[in-house]
Image (cartoon, coloured by chain):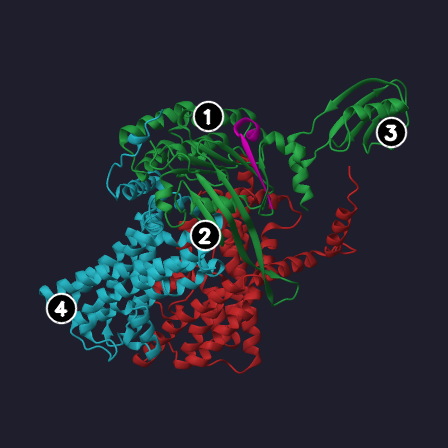
Chain colours: A green, B red, C cyan
Amino acid sequence: MDEHSSAEPIIDIDDLTRQFTVYRKNGSRWRRHRDTITAVDRMSFRIERGSAVGYIGANGAGKSTTIKMLTGILVPTTGSVRTCGLEPVRQRRELAARIGVVFGQRSQLWWDLPLHESFSILAAIHRLDPDIADKRTHELVEQLEMADTLDTPVRQLSLGQRMRAEVAAALLHSPELVILDEPTIGLDVLSKQRLREFLRAERIERGTTLLLTTHDMGDIERLCDRVLVVDHGRLVYDGSLAGLGATVGARRVLVVDLAAPTPDLDDLPCGAQLLSSEAGGMRQRLAFDAEHTTAAALLAAVSDRAQVRDLSIEEPGIEDVVRRIYESAR
Amino acid sequence: MRGDAEGDGRVALAMRRCVFRRRTPSTFGVYWKLARAGFKRQAQYKLAMFAGLFTNCVFGFVRAAVMVAAVRAAGDFGGYDEGTIGAYVWLSQALLGATQFMGPPIDLVDRIKSGDVAIDFLRPVDVQLSYLATDMGRAACTFLPRGVPSIVIGAATFGLSMPTTPVAYLLGLISVLLAVALSFLCLFAVALIGFWVVEIRGIRVLYQIVGTFLAGLFVPVHMFPDWLRTIALATPFPSILQSPIDTLSGRVAGMDALLTVAAQGFWVLVIGLLGRVLLRAGQRRLEVQGG
Amino acid sequence: MAEPDSARIVAGTWFTPYLAVLRSRVKAQQVYRLSFATEVFSAFLIGLVEFAEVWVIFHNVGTLGGLDTNAALLLFGLSNTSFALAQVLVGHLDSLPAMIRMGTLDAYHLRPQPLLLQLITSDISLRRLARAAVAVIVLGVGLWRNEIDWGIAPVTLIVITLISGIALFCGLFVCAAGLQFFLIDGAELTNSFTYGGSFAAMQPASVFPAPLKLLFGFAIPVAFTAYVPTIALLGLPGPPLLPAWSAWLTPVAAAWVWLLAFAAWRIGTRHYQGGGG
């Protein structure tokens, strides 16, 4: 089926660096001084065929730059990148036939023409056999529920409809690798769900590899089996989503309901932090670090001070986890 | 939740840069500020201004060569001699930057297209005048990098004769100010068509070509055949280029100059009013149609 | 699972992608009838005004640079037909700065065709045919009114001039596009040789001082699109730098401009991709 061994990763990035020269005014009127920004800093990772990887990071962390280097738009300053076994810049046209890219913010469709025109043009661009193109278009239209938008000019589509169209357009030529840059941005919950379902099905049926950039944790949770976190151009985490929470040391919260109003428990021995105290101290929320203490130890410490009537534990949300990463970087 | 003292400190530092006046500025003060803002903004586009100057000069060289040859070949070329025709060519090129005839579309065009113009209507300043003030600032900024060098280069390469009396320059300055204002008001009015027509790029290009021709950019209006000159004088365009050129180069002097400037003032009022009428109509359309 | 092998069948020919896009652009322009009609009228008016610019001068002068009013018709007709048709084909390249700024250029990188060819075939400005029509009419009138020694040679010369002229101006637009990757803010700089070149082509080059003759006769040889062929057709001697017989060298001029264009494009795209450091 493949011309290359299935052992070769579909994305292979090694010590990849990309620097930009920027001219900044440093206060004086006429002179500008040069600054070098390192958008991507010695990044290395491999992505195997058929996997689904989430790529998260704050704005400006280097995600788009990495994608541009993966797809042949930008040349790396140093380091190497291979996509589908090809060199992206040198073999851009060959690569274009094997990958599909969806840019959330920019359209690849033709604005003033009906949607079906865009599909036929793209089929011609990829020189697809007309019958195959037809079949594939029907398949995509059906699965993405776009039948009633085919005759609408693209510029009149709603955001949700347009995103589905962009995804269909990117998948028309059945690429091995699909890169999606913020595909669910601005979509309502239902549209997001539909899109995720579709991508998941696509991956199962065709073994398509997915690389997904997003700020939406829901996308990651439902679609990806691996997460790459990038911060200031550096890869700070590469692993599963579950491990991410543990690594960042996000805190669990113990919520205690006490029998009587109690003064704030803000000086407990095990280093727990009082987050809030309600109803005169009858309900207090204590955050603790899983590395420094356990829920049991904390409970014991609280019980020493007051009578505990009820308790519950809150786990760190993914948003919290990611926010901590972003903020720890500042 | 966390005491972000550091963050607060940063905000305070940034706020110190925003200077708020102790008392509310007068209306003139507002427009002056807008003009200054327009000036500062234009000052950032140094490369663009140089590019404009370069293109001005290339066109200037070609036109000057042709015009000088024409003056030499013809017995009477509209009453111009080599010096005065040089002044005509280079002054017209110099004024292109300020009058932004050939430049990119004004902001208003995009704002109408995107609907952002609705925000402009909510502001407590007059829309037309505030845009005008900003543009005057912009035009002032092109004076040094584009306007003056064009004349200097023209004088150095082809030679041109300019008047020696200060009166001519004073009247010339007034004429230039009126011309720039008029040019902007025309562009403003054209941009307003965007309220009714989706894509006005074609109209803009047509305006650029017909407008520059009738303004006397390529041939002095004086030398148009009578019927064409009548058409031109029925439009505001000659007041945008031909009038300030004539006044500044001394081709019209004394009473004639005053009349020329008066005609410019007339057109400023007419087009200004037209702009306001269109603006009001556009605003009403926006209110009815929605964003 | 799926049918990957059959999906690899490559259908059509190498120009199928380009034809598809062009056809869609033509269709798009037909859809908005009223808008298209006004744009055609506008282009026609522009053509008239451009002619008026030349005509008013000659109306006042009679003879300029060794050419009379009838010769001026040829001058205008040849240069503007070439330029207008070049604009029909590649005039849309001046939206490149906007595409770079808004990032829409990236979409072209994701298609399996060379970037420049994609951009050239990404649109075709049919409305500018109206402008070409004005120029063709003026050219026709010029050919009729002038005393030309008709034969195979003049006809061949006219055909070669027009084709090379179109190629030359297309090359100028491509050259300008290549430079846009550097200029961004200073995009107007390229107007100096695209629209400036067209303007210079309409003038009798004999009136140019030496530096201008070198510029528009050799560096950006637009003089070959109209002036030199005009004096060749009319049997006039030319200025020493641009003799009449060099009218046959217009294809060389076009080739030179395309050399510059390819160089500018290569350097420009390298810079955009960051290859130039």
Of pointers 2 and 3, the one earlier in the residue sequence: 2
Task: For mark 2, give the secondary structure.
Answer: loop
Residue type at mark 1: give it.
Answer: Phe
Front residue of A134 and B258: A134
Point out which mark residue C148 bears: 4
Mark 2–mark 4 distance (CA, rounded to whole Å): 57 Å
**Quadrant of residue A23 within the rendered picture:** bottom right
The residue that mark 3 highlights is A265
Residue B103: give x, y in percent of width and height: 47, 59
The residue closer to the viewer here, C198 or A273, is A273
Closer to the camera: disc 2 or disc 1?
2
**Label 3, label 4: how far apart the Cα atoms are:** 106 Å
Residue drawn at 45 percent across, 69 percent down = B54
Q: Quadrant of the C terminus of chain B?
A: top right
Q: Which residues are magenta?
A: A219-231
What is the x, y in percent for residue C227? 25, 70
On screen, residue B226 above or below A71: below
Q: Residue furthest left?
A: C151
Q: Quadrant of residue B198?
A: top left
Mark 4 neighbour class, 10 Å CA radius: few under 14, some 14 to 19, many 20 or more: few
Q: Which residue is at the front of the view, B39 or B240?
A: B39
Is A111 magenta? The answer is: no
Residue on which the image places disc 1: A198
Q: Earlier in the sequence, mark 2 or mark 1?
A: 2
Identify the secondary structure beneath mark 1: helix
Answer yes or no: are tags 3 and 4 on the same subunit.
Answer: no
**Where residue C150 sits in the image (x, y, percent)?**
10, 66
Q: Which is closer to the viewer, label 3 or label 4?
A: 3
Compute the Cα span from label 1 to label 4. Answer: 71 Å
Of circles 1 and 4, the one toward us is: 1
**Which quarter of the figure is the N terminus of chain B placed in?**
top right
